[in-house]
């Protein structure tokens, strides 16, 4: 398990390698180009790390040191809404080629209504019954003059 890693900008890696190895560190990556040289140093022992960092920072070939923060990947979870299928429904549908979420949606007829909050309108008595919507398209663009230019 990697406890800490440090990105180190330096002038001469050969001088630093011996110090790193003596202090329980490992050079895991090296970058060399015309502008700078740098290494990534990893310490497995947290107790020795602080002393080693102090010694490395004061080393004449080290120009700068920065800690590389190790972050854990967030746990991905899926939250479902609506009725969860019972174990018997799961067993009955297990031979289906559909996915589990699709089977759950089949068993929950109200799921889309809950997600779009239509269920709130239904609770207030608004059902949409008797509403008619008509769209007329004349085929003439409102921006025709601009399109011709």
Image (cartoon, helix red, strand yellow):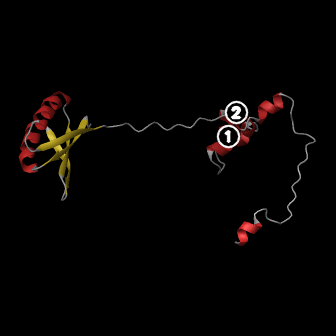
Nearer to me, 16 or 60:
60
32 displayed left or right of 76: left
Determine the secondary structure under disc 2: loop
Give yes or no for contact between labels 2 and 1 (Cβ–Cβ under 8 Å): yes
Earlier-in-chain disc, 2 versus 1:
2
| Position above or below: 33 against 95 | below
Residue at 66% of width from left, 49% of height from top? 96
Question: Residue 83, which numbered label?
Answer: 2
Residue on which the image places disc 1: 104
24 displayed left or right of 93: left
Determine the secondary structure under disc 1: helix
Residue at 87% of width from left, 36% of height from top? 127
Residue at 91% of width from left, 40% of height from top? 129
Location of residue 89 by image quarter:
top right
Quote the CA–CA distance across marks 2 and 1: 8 Å
Give how far across and how far down residue 145 sits, in percent. 75, 68
């Amino acid at each position: 398990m990697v406890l800490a890693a440090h990105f180190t900008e330096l002038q001469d890696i050969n001088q630093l390698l011996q110090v790193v190895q003596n202090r329980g560190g490992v050079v895991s990556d090296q970058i060399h180009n015309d502008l700078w040289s740098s290494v990534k140093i990893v310490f497995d022992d947290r107790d020795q790390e602080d002393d080693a960092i102090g010694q490395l920072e004061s080393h004449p070939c080290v120009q700068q040191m920065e800690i590389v923060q190790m972050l854990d990947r967030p746990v991905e979870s899926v939250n479902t809404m609506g009725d969860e299928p019972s174990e018997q429904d799961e067993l009955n549908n297990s031979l289906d080629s559909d996915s589990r979420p699709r089977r759950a949606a089949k068993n929950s007829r109200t799921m889309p209504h809950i997600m779009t909050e239509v269920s709130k309108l239904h609770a207030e008595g608004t059902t949409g019954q008797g509403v008619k919507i008509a769209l007329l398209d004349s085929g003439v663009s409102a921006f025709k003059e601009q399109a011709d230019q």
